[in-house]
Image: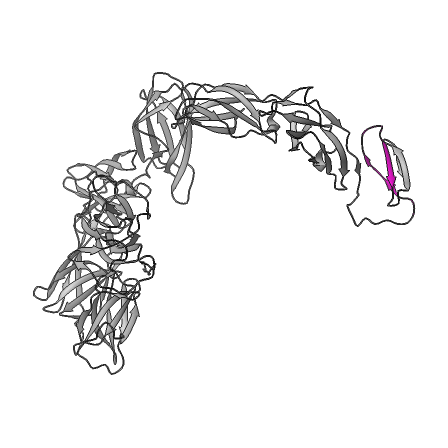
Amino acid sequence: MTSFRARGAAAACALIVIGTTFVATAPASASPERATPASNSSTVAAPSAPKLEALYWATADGEAYFIRGTGTPDVPVYLDLGADSEPVWLETPGADGRWEALLPVVGQSVNIFAQPNGGDRSPMTTVAVPEAGGAIFVGKPAAGVTHDGDTLRVVGSSAGGNSVNVYAPGATRADAPIATAAVTDGAFSAALPAGYSASSVLVAAAIGAAESDRVEVRIGDSAVAAPTVSRVLHQANGDFTIIGTTPVGSTVAIRQGGIEIGGANEEGGNFRATVPAAHSGQTVDLVATIGSTSSAPTKHGLTPPPIDDSIAPPEVTRVINFLDGSQWVHGKVANGATLWVLDGAKVVAHDVANETFLLKIPAQYASTQLDVRVFVGGSMSARSVLPRTLTVDGLQESNSYTPGKRTFAGTAEAGATVTATDKGGNELFSERVSSSRAAAGSWTGTADLSSKDGYELTFTQTTSDGRSSVLQSATFTPSTIAAPEYLETQRGGNGEFFLYGTAPENTTVVARIGADEVATGAVEDGDFVMSPISGARTGETVTLVARDADGNESAGTDVRLAPALEDATIAQPVVGNVHAFPSGRVRLQGAAGQSGTVWLMDGDRVVDSSPANRFSIEVPAGQSSSQLDLVRVSGSTGNRTSERIAIPRLLQVNGLQEKDNTYTPGRTPFTGSAEAGATITATDQNGTTLFETTVGATKRA
């Protein structure tokens, strides 16, 4: 069930209600998800038109509006803005049929309709939208008065309001209500004050301070008797026909979650009402009303027909999947039998067959487990289970490819096998679908599309118990994409590589080193620049390919990530200070002119960088024992450097901390590492030499 709440401040104002037209406002900036519903006919009947139940402010100043209504469960509601615009998806009602959305228009007349994916549109409901700050509309509630012992209760339903207010007869807009109640799951119950003696009450649905028109409900000596259900019939299209008795002169309303989904007039003390198949498995309320007084609800569950094992189930011979997610189901059945396609207990498609049948299932059920059954004389056969819909990611009716290997992926029934074949029936791959708790799994398969003559592929799903479905006649035409043309390389301040060049429009340039994609570059006006490639890849070769939207790729263009060239005319950096920290890291400081960058090099790899003027370079602890060099980079492209200055292998003292070292008075040995043959001298805070040794020997202080 769905409980609605006010999502914006509301203010009391006059109501505008003209037939089924109501008034609404929303800012032009509102932009819910857009969708274009399909318009193909199917065996699913067109839904009823959406019914508007409320319109209220989404903002305190009325600059935007929420619209609230009821409709067919699980059937999307769209906003039609006219022939020049695509319909805008507003919301999809839940199982209780209620929906709520932000209106994305102001100052114009629009239409609202419902349409299942792959089905027909409902009739239109017209909405005249004024400018901002217009009136708030709340639909009237349905109400009656019942006796609860000595307490009188106003009970009923409201699909538009968040609450209801109950007033004494003759109350004005300024008078306070004598009782209030919240609307929960579309229903309400408000107790009248003890000793209330008037013959009627006024009931209004409310959102904040805004109310619907008030409904007068008379109070009788006793409540109207509730209707009784005698039997429930199942129709060929899955709808329910409820037959029963009701008081003479009454009308019967059938509600689910406070929303009226059917009804009938009394005839000779009996009634006969139809409820749509979409409510299968739900419990409905039947309420009898005479005048302004309603009965207590009679609850009744709408259960599917029983299964009769003597009815032969349908034989499904072929299932064809289409790219939009819809399916055609072929099969055999007894002549004149009624066929149902069910999503659980809900009939989603039906037909009457003459020995063979062909059922179209809308795309909205592509991800659900569906069954096909025969319906005869109020009973159903055992089910014939349809395989989950087979999908292939990115597949179109016409596709292009670059001759070579191509990987396909998609979804199908968990544990099934997906096989791809060409027009001649040659198998290109056969792969198992992954397992999944949701019963639909994923698959991938690689086909060798080496021919330059094109392909027509068929994908076949075969489940572990032998059921199958196909997605066929997907054509592939070879595509020739020109290879990227490399123009130049520039180096970034941290040594990274930027590659520039040209490539065909509507492609993306991909850089690979071996099998790894290390960078991409968008093509704009025929030019590309790759995202940075780490300087750590210096000396390696990248392959540039152009890739189109279908995943087809050009031949490759190889580019070597060459080290920068040394230029003796570029001034070398000058090291002024070397600070070794006990943790092992080392800081080098100095100067190298007023412009450019200083790189710390480990071979051809850039370890760290700093602006040349008053540079400060950090050597990580793990590299302080490596042979490192300093160079100055000059020029806009970063492809030329000064000659290298070799940094002595850096001094390390084993076990030394930056502070809080302890010692036992006496002679203490120190060990570590430094440049071979160098002299190590230790001094105290007074400058007194404690020891001096040559690297390779051990001394005690």
Q: Nearer the viewer, residue 667 or 604?
A: 604
| Spot occupied by residue 334 in the image (x, y as percentages of width and height) | 17, 40
Q: Is residue 411 left or right of residue 497?
A: left
Q: Is residue 119 left or right of residue 580?
A: left
Quadrant containing the N terminus is bottom left
Q: Nearer the viewer, residue 61 or 304?
A: 61
Would residue 294 be seen by someone viewing this image from the given angle?
Answer: no
Which residue lies most toward the bottom here?
Answer: 195
| Spot occupied by residue 581 in the image (x, y as percentages of width and height) | 76, 41
Quadrant containing the C terminus is top right
**Which residue corresponds to the image point at 27% horizontal and 82% vertical from the top-left?**
194
Confirm whether the magenta stretch covers residue 673. Answer: yes
Which residues are drawn in magenta?
666-683
Would residue 549 be seen by someone viewing this image from the given angle?
Answer: yes
Q: Nearer the viewer, residue 215 or 218?
A: 215
Which residue lies most toward the front here?
Answer: 594
Quarter of the image for residue 53 reads bottom left
Which residue lies most toward the top here?
Answer: 452
| Spot occupied by residue 274 in the image (x, y as percentages of width and height) | 16, 56
**Which residue corresponds to the image point at 23% horizontal and 68% vertical from the top-left?**
204
Confirm whether the magenta stretch covers residue 653. Answer: no
